[in-house]
DNA sequence: TGAATGCGTGTTATAGTATAACGTAACATA
DNA sequence: TATGTTACGTTATACTATAACACGCATTCA
């Protein structure tokens, strides 16, 4: 989907990125959390919590749901992964440095997801929130459809 | 939240609206579907599927999950209700005539939801989809935060 | 030193959300 | 009346997520 790339690089840079960020912020990117993050990035599509759980099980037999959900919560909270509410699935954040409003293009064909940022969109959302005297704290914008490749 | 109103009127007009729409489109708004729609509208906030199930049980003892989900699917498909993915809950659509991109202001304080439409936002979403050669089919835009009243 | 605290994780149990699969009833139409 | 279609009933199960409590380990500070 979208564009091809060497995905190992993705994973690697995502992990080292995360380490830097946690270092700077004084957060503990424990082994468990790192493994979960790695598994989120391992495929380039959205990943289900229970799939992570299964894969985690290969190494540490005792993984149970809370193990995974707690790690995901940590990663979410610090902007390292996003949850796609329309899929109940998780993706790695592709630019975790910036505090950003992002939106997701979710392809129904190849099940891949692209994360995007866009000033116009952000402004539009903020200004319409203002209109309603509404103070936004978190925003979910998920666009399902077909990517260029799959719509052919 | 937002503004007060006589909610009975809401329910009533939503139901008669739905009847008209189904009439025109040749859809069958059965008793069950109508009751589910009524229960979605009964509170002015988002409603959970299993809450509908419970209330349905009062009258027709045999309601089971598929009963409710099937009705909700029907109502969703024809634009009479929306699902809020970030809450796993459902709200009645406040303007089911128009095919529209809508977004939701979800108040964490009073748990009420306002549905809005906005051309600027719609355009922004479409144009950014275009940029990525992405063909959108369904859009989820949910903004959580505090409404005017609750942010005081 | 050791009590107190906080945090991350393990573990058990359970809550909450949703669908598959199959059967039957109700309706529409020829 | 036969036929196909749609809606609904029913049972079972899958999938998603959290509560609650226990344990270990690091930090701190009296």
Image (cartoon, coloured by chain):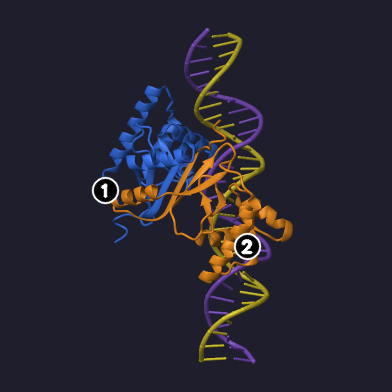
Chain colours: A orange, B blue, C purple, D yellow
Q: Chain letter of disc 2? A: A
Residue at left 47%, top 46%? B85
Along the viewing direction, whichever of B24 and A30 lies nearer the viewer: A30
Q: Residues within 10 Å of mark 2 (few under 14, many from 20)?
A: some
| Above-or-below relation of B108 to C6 | above
Image coordinates of residue B116 in percent, x first then y, are 34, 43
Q: How many marks?
A: 2
Residue at left 55%, top 38%? A108
Q: Chain letter of disc 1? A: B
What is the number of the mark on residue A135? none
Q: Residues within 10 Å of mark 1 (few under 14, many from 20)?
A: few
| Above-or-below relation of B147 to B23 | below
Residue A137 visible in this rendered orientation of the protein: yes
Identify the element where label 2 is drawn: helix
Residue at left 29%, top 55%? B148
Instruction: Same chain for labels 1 and 2? Say yes or no.
Output: no
Residue beneath disc 2: A34
Separation of marks 1 and 2 at Cα, in angstroms: 48 Å
Image coordinates of residue B101 in percent, x first then y, are 39, 38
What is the number of the mark on residue B4? 1
Quarter holding the C terminus of chain A? top right
């Amino acid at each position: 989907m979208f564009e091809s790339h060497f995905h190992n690089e993705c994973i690697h840079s995502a992990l080292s990125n995360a380490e830097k960020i946690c270092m700077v912020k004084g957060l503990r990117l424990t082994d468990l959390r790192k493994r979960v993050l790695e598994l989120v990035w391992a495929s380039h599509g959205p990943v289900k919590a229970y799939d992570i759980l299964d894969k985690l099980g290969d190494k540490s037999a005792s993984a149970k749901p809370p193990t995974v959900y707690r790690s995901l919560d940590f990663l979410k909270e610090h902007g390292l992964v996003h949850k796609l509410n329309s899929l109940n699935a998780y993706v790695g954040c592709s630019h975790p440095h910036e505090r950003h409003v992002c939106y997701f293009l979710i392809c129904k064909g190849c099940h891949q997801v692209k994360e995007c940022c866009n000033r116009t969109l952000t402004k539009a959302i903020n200004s319409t929130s203002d209109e309603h005297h509404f103070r936004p704290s978190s925003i979910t914008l998920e666009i399902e459809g077909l990517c260029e490749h799959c719509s052919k």
